[in-house]
Amino acid sequence: MTPALVLWIYSVLLVLGGLMGFIKARSKISLIASVACAIPIALVALGKLPMAVAWVVIALLGGMFTARYIRGRKPMPAIPMIVASVVALGLLYWMGR
């Protein structure tokens, strides 16, 4: 597994989650935000942006979803995104050593 593959998987999961939010709750902001966050991650995977951008975006998303879970205690979509963020950051760290 390469860092680019990790980033592609994370960005696809991110967009699928936004699409699910749009389909289930008609949340346009969910879809727009997921695509807006997936774009810089995809650009890092393509080598167009430095890896630090992906680290920051993934960490901010993980933090945002953690805060949302603490405030609202709604497990969806917070817990899957927290897990995906921690796994992605862990894999990127492990591969970068």
Image: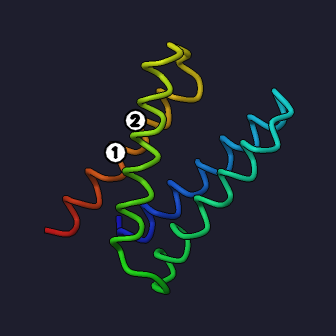
In front: 44, or 97? 44
User: Pointer 1: residues within 10 angstroms few (<14), some, or many (20+)?
Assistant: some
- Residue annotated with mark 1: 87
Q: Quadrant of the N terminus?
A: bottom left
Q: Amino acid at mark 2?
A: Val
> Which residue is at 40% across, 35% downward?
83
- Residue annotated with mark 2: 83
Q: Quadrant of residue 92?
A: bottom left
> Which residue is at 31% across, 53% downward?
89
Q: Is residue 87 left or right of residue 68?
A: left
Q: How many marks?
A: 2
Residue 7: horizontal and vertical position, in percent? 46, 63
> Which residue is at 13% across, 68% downward?
97
In front: 49, or 70? 70
Give the number of the disc on residue 11. none
Residue 37: horizontal and vertical position, in percent? 58, 58
Residue with the most extreme front position: 71
Residue with the most extreme bottom position: 48
Assign a secondary structure to mark 1: helix
Q: Is residue 36 left or right of residue 53?
A: right
Q: Quadrant of residue 67?
A: top left
> Which residue is at 51% across, 29% downward?
78
Q: Is residue 74 left or right of residue 54?
A: right
Query: Disc 1 versus disc 2: distance between alpha carbons?
Result: 6 Å
Q: Amino acid at mark 1?
A: Val
Assign a secondary structure to mark 2: helix
Residue 24: horizontal and vertical position, in percent? 82, 27
C-beta proximity under 8 Å, tags 1 and 2? yes
In front: 39, or 6? 39
Residue 6 higher or lower than 21, as above or below: below
